[in-house]
Image: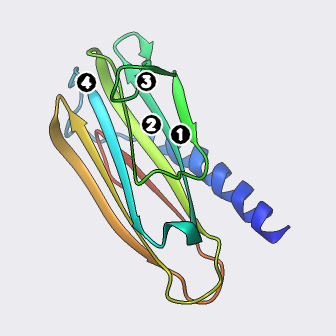
Amino acid sequence: MKKRILSLLGVIALFLGVILVSCGNDDDNKNTTGVHKIVVEQSGNTDDFDLNIAFGAANTGGVAKLYNENGEYLGDSYLVNKVTENKISCQTGKEGSMMTCAGSVISTSEQAGKKLKISVIAYIDNKEVNRLEKEYITKGSTLVENFSVSTTSVE
């Protein structure tokens, strides 16, 4: 029951992160229209952690459609609970103006010393604009942490 509550809190925090990043006022890449893409990679003790990710984006006309690397439509937003792949990515069409990714990491093992490394890289037209690399290590209790990256900011 405790794990379910923590997972629910993680998902809630994940959506709050998307909302807060979307409301950010960082001007580094403001008004940069093109293909916005975010790639998330995980490695380490992946079976001992739940990685949950939400993607969202905007274009010049409002909400942007999201696609995978093969060009298959994923939706206007894309949520992945308990990522099982080592690499996942999401991108806009050619008219993207901003993209964000918020995530939560929840340990499923209370054994100390389990490690998960994540790398989140944001691109605009295949040019890297932001990067977050973080390693999570369990310390004998449940670990719950959140992160967010966009094509305009890293938190």
Q: Looking at the image, which residue is at 43% across and 23% down?
A: 66
Q: Nearer the viewer, residue 42 or 4?
A: 42
Secondary structure category for the residue under label 2: helix
- Dot 1, how many residues are within 10 Å of its Cα: few (below 14), some (14-19), or many (20+)? some
Q: Position of residue 152 (x, y in %)?
A: 28, 40
Give amino acid for label 2: Ser
Q: Nearer the viewer, residue 21 or 37?
A: 37
Q: Which mark is residue 22?
A: 2
Which badge, 1 or 4, is on the more N-terminal residue?
A: 1
Q: Which mark is residue 19?
A: 1
Q: Which mark is residue 66?
A: 3
Which badge, 1 or 3, is on the more N-terminal residue?
A: 1
Which badge, 4 or 3, is on the more N-terminal residue?
A: 4
Residue located beneath label 4 in the image: 35
The colour scheme of the drawn protein is rainbow
Q: Position of residue 3 (x, y in %)?
A: 76, 67
Give amino acid for label 4: Val
Secondary structure category for the residue under label 4: loop
Q: CA distance from mark 2 to mark 3?
A: 16 Å
In this rendering, the label closer to the viewer, 1 or 4 = 4
Q: Are the residues at dot 2 and dot 1 in contact (C-beta closer than 8 Å)?
A: yes
Secondary structure category for the residue under label 3: strand
In this rendering, the label closer to the viewer, 2 or 3 = 3
